[in-house]
Every structure is written in C-alpha cells, then in structure tokens.
Image (tube, rainbow, N blue to C red):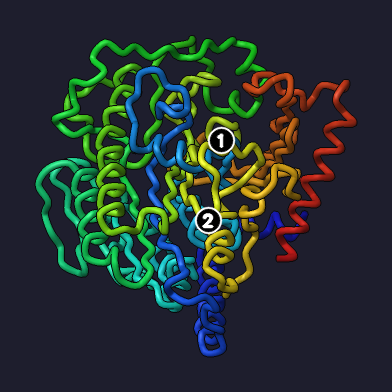
Amino acid sequence: MKIYYLRMNMKSTNIISLKCLSFLMIVTSFFSFTCVSQSSSDLPNIIFIITDDQQIGLTSIEGNPVSKTPNIDRIAKEGATFEKFLVATPLCSPSRASFLTGQYAQKHAVINNDRIGLDVISHTLMTWPRQLRENGYKTAYIGKWHMGLDDSRRPGFDRWLSFKGQGIFVNGVVNDEGTIKQIDGNMTDYLNEQAVNFLKKNGKNKPFAMILSHKAVHAPIIPAERHSAYYADYEYEAPLVSKGNIKSKPVFQRNVQWRPPYEYQNIVPEPGEPRRGRGNDRTSIVADQMRCLLSVDEGVGEIFKVLEENGQLDNTIIVYTSDNGMLMGEHNRFHTKRWAYDNVLRVPFFIRYPKMIEAGSKIDKMVSNIDWAPTVYEVVGVEPMIPVHGKSFLPLFKSEEAEWRTSFYAEYFHEKVARNTPSWQAVRTKDWKYVNYVGLETDEMNELYDLKNDPGEEFNLYKNQAYKQQLETMKIEFQNKLTEINNN
C-alpha cells in the first residue's frame, strides 16, 4: 500500500521521466516485433466512435422515451450492448488514454486533465492504432484528442485532424494534417464529414482503423442550429435526493454544503465557449445533450451508408461509447463527473461485428475501457508491445459462462480545477463497492455500498458496525487489486 500511495502522489516530472524510459523501451522493441499472422484480406476494419461526457440513458436503445438515435441504436440491435461497461478513471483524458493503451492511468501516466506534461506523455503512448499501423492498417484520428494542448499529429496515425484542448462547437479551429483551418458551422457536423471522407477514400483498400472522437456532448453542449428546437416540450425529471443521502457521504461535507433537490449546480472547471444564450437549467442541459446526439447519430448513419456502398459493412467492427458518465442530479450533483459512483463510471458501449457477435446480444459482466485494446489485439492477431492491465472480452461473445473478472478497480487523481474532489481508489464487485479516499486526514471519509440492495449508492455503510466483516472483505479485495496492478 505504501508503494502505491507514493505512486499516487508522484510529481509530474517523475511521471514524464518514467514515460520517456518506457518510450525508449518501446522504440527498441519495434526492431524485434513479429508481424501479423493473418493475411490482410482476413483482417477486420475498425471504427471506434467515442463521445464526450455521455451518461448512460441518453439513447433510445437504452430506453430513453424521448431521444431519437436510430443509427446508434442499429449498432446495438445488430451487435451487442454492454450493460456494465465501466471506465477506470471517470475523466476525459485518462479514460481516452486507457481506451487507447489498455492500461490504468497510474501506468500510462495521463492521470488527469491538468495539462502539464500531457503533451509529452501523449506523444509516447503505445496505442492500439499505432500497433495496427505498424502491421499494415491505414489509421485515422478525427476529433478531440485532449491529452495536452498540443494538437499536432500523434504517432500511429496516417490521417490526423484534431484541435487544441476541448475545442469549440461553433466555427472552431482545427489542425488538419498540420494545416490550421477555421471551419464554418458546428464541430460535430464537420467531424462527421471528415470521417465519411476518410472512409470513401480508404474503405476499399487495405484494412483501416478510424477513431471518430466527438466533442459532443461535452459542455457547453451547443447543438447544430437545425436541431436547436427539437424536444421543445421535454422536461427533465431529476431524481429525488434525500438529505440523508448527502449526510451519509462525509467527503461531501468537507467543502460542499447540502443543497435542496432541483437547485442547479453545474460544475464545469474547464473554460470554454459560452452557452450562447441557451438555458442553464437542468431541462435545457439534458435537452441539448439529446439535440447534440441528433448530429452524432446522423454521422453514424452516414458511416453505415458508405460502408454498405464499399461492401465493407460486415467486415468492419463498429464501436460506440463515451469517455465517462455523469451525475445528473444523483446525490444532488448535476452535470458532474470525477466521483466513484456508478452513474459516473458507467458508459454506453455498443459493438457490431456479425462475424463474431450475435445480433441483440447483452453482456452483463463488468467490462472496462482497459479491455478494449487487448480485445483489438486478439481480433487482429498481434501481441501487445507493452504490458496491459485489461483482457480481451471476445470470450464473452461465445459463452455467458466464460471466465471473467469478479471485481473491478477504478481510480481518480486530484486536479487543481476540481478542488472538492480528492484522489480516490475504488473496488467494485457484483454486489459491493468500497471507496478509499487517498491522502485525507481520516479514513472516515471512505465509503461502502451494498449495490444489490442499494443500486443508487444512497446509504454509505462504512461506519455501520453491522457491515464490519463485509468491509474487511472488500479491503482485502482492494489490496489484492493493487498488488495485481503493481505486478503488471
């Protein structure tokens, strides 16, 4: 535990030096790497679509009675829905790095959104597109990168289009192959157009891998003008929150006073463009999320269309997901991430690939973003060039009884911009969750939840003596996970 605590509190300079050492090892390993064993004609294309800050329940396939997302839904209907897909760090930059590397943030070192050092670190990451490119794939990154302010091309991508930091929704500026361009209109539409153009040019050639990384539905959540009046009669029904819910969470009492339900409390620490006159009430925020998804969904429809025209649809793995969820009124926090609760850790994850996945499949196991890169490696037939913490989830498509993890680990590293959220580590089993806050003056801030009987995580049982034995069991599981990670 002591070793891990030091790792949680490393200075950024130490992290960067470690990453530079890792990079030298990666470069050296290139010379001895064994190429893909499959012929290029057998290799699937990969399209990975990721949105920003999209909590579960925004799409119609997830049961939303208002939102219209027929093309996103198609991925799930013709593929699989992961019902407990969890991110290892509920924050944009670390989560994206975990999707790309298969590692926890403490390993890949993109620990937060505080940008010091992230430009250097993110240039050294050994990502799954980088490995695929070395093995014959045509690769593309289109959209938000966000690991540092630098928008220059990262290693591993033939096609590069991105922007600085968060970017902006309306009339933004992009880096297109090193050329800085001012665009006209909504960023979501522009990214969709560029993704479709890439597929039209490369969809019939050697296998390709494209990441389409949307800014939507991140704040300030500005939909395309043609969608601005949709859902005009919508009214958001925020969850009821009792005062006891907040009182059971001592960490909330440190700096944040309890507020009555429905009082808007929007925390957006990263500066950006204003809401442009759009409302800041809860209904306006959620309605605009769904309006932004209309553009995202149109882009997914265009991607389906060009894949069908190229005869590549069924030979293409299509993934749709998000980097983190959100509290949308739960625990009296609205439009807030960074915490260890399921509403923040869980994200939508839909995947379509008829050669391996039965249409309409439902996966109920705890699968994580650290599992995506290992899954790609198994599908394509390459060995990862760096140690990964995740594991391929392909066996879950073959059998519901496939051996899988029984516990899930997550972590968060404190940021200057999120003053009220301390560093934490958490372990989750099927029925229990334990949250350990790092570096606080007392462990009484910690949390224990009975997920079977309290799925909303309303009642913190950490100090309840009736659950002392269960707490000890979870602490042992917690230590086991730390040992497992440190040994990888």
Label placed on residue 98: 2
Say whether residue 473 is left or right of residue 84: right
Residue 433 in percent (x, y) is at 72, 34
**Element class at badge 2:** helix
* Number of residue marks: 2
**In the rendered image, the vertical position of residue 110 relative to residue 429, given as above or below:** below
Q: What residue is pinned by disc 1?
A: 339
The Cα atoms of the two marked residues, 1 and 2, are separated by: 17 Å
**In the rendered image, the vertical position of residue 387 relative to residue 357, given as above or below:** below
Residue 53 in percent (x, y) is at 41, 38
Q: Which corner quadrant holds the N terminus?
A: bottom right
**In the rendered image, the vertical position of residue 237 relative to residue 409, given as above or below:** above
Q: Foreground: 339 or 8?
A: 339
Q: Residue at x 56, y 73 (%)?
A: 382
Counting other residues with Cα less than 10 Å from the Cα at mark 1, is it few (<14), some (14-19), or many (20 or more)?
many
Q: Give the quarter of the image for residue 488.
A: bottom right
